[in-house]
Image (cartoon, helix red, strand yellow):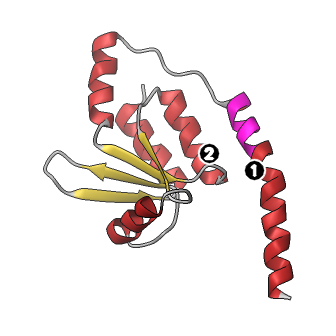
Amino acid sequence: MRVLIRYFFRGVRLVLAPVMIISEKLTTPSALERAPAEQARVDEACQRLALYQFRTCPFCIKVRKEIARLGLDIELRDTQQDPAHKQALIEGGGQPKVPCLKINHEDGHEEWLYESDDINRWLHQRFGV
């Protein structure tokens, strides 16, 4: 019975995945316009950020849309396709849950921020207008 349930949900994911990806492409907002100097400052700050995610996670899509809206160039690390990223997430953040924003602070310490709403709030406070 477990096997049937597992295959049922895998089938549902196979059907819904393309729909979610197309929906994300069609509904992603355009980026904020910044002065070139300001955008360069933002891009430099984004070099210390990495988003652990996977392509069809609805919460990850929510965060990627906010990243696009704010015009941020944050490295995306797919934990579903790359076992090394998944292992780094578990070792650093303590759990394999996505989305997770890894923040390398200027003083050298790392912060692992989980929950899409918390990540979006942090991004908006740090980079929003």
Give the left or right position of residue 103, taking residue 64 as reference: left
The amino acid marked with disc number 1 is Ala
Q: Quadrant of residue 8?
A: bottom right
Q: Is residue 42 above or below residue 9?
A: above
Disc 1 is placed on an element classified as helix
Residue 35 in the image: x percent, y percent? 35, 11
Predominant secondary structure in magenta?
helix
Q: Quadrant of residue 88?
A: bottom left
In this view, which residue lies farthest toward the left? 107
Q: Look at discs 2 and 1 and give the one toward the viewer.
A: 1
Give the left or right position of residue 66, taking residue 57 as reference: left
Residue 2 in the image: x percent, y percent? 80, 86
Give the residue pinned by disc 2. Answer: 61
Give the left or right position of residue 5, taking residue 106 as reference: right
| Image quadrant where one finds the C terminus | top left
| Image quadrant where one finds the N terminus | bottom right
Disc 2 is placed on an element classified as helix
Magenta residues, as a range? 20-26
Q: Which numbered disc flags the more N-terminal residue, 2 or 1?
A: 1
Q: Say which mark, if any, is on residue 17.
A: 1
Give the left or right position of residue 59, taking residue 91 as reference: right
Q: Is residue 80 above or below residue 42?
A: below
Confirm whether the magenta stretch covers residue 63. Answer: no
The reply to whether discs 2 and 1 touch (Cβ–Cβ < 8 Å) is no
Confirm whether the magenta stretch covers residue 23. Answer: yes
The amino acid marked with disc number 2 is Ile
| Crowd band around label 2 with a 10 angstrom C-alpha radius: few (<14), some (14–19), many (20+) | many
| Crowd band around label 1 with a 10 angstrom C-alpha radius: few (<14), some (14–19), many (20+) | some
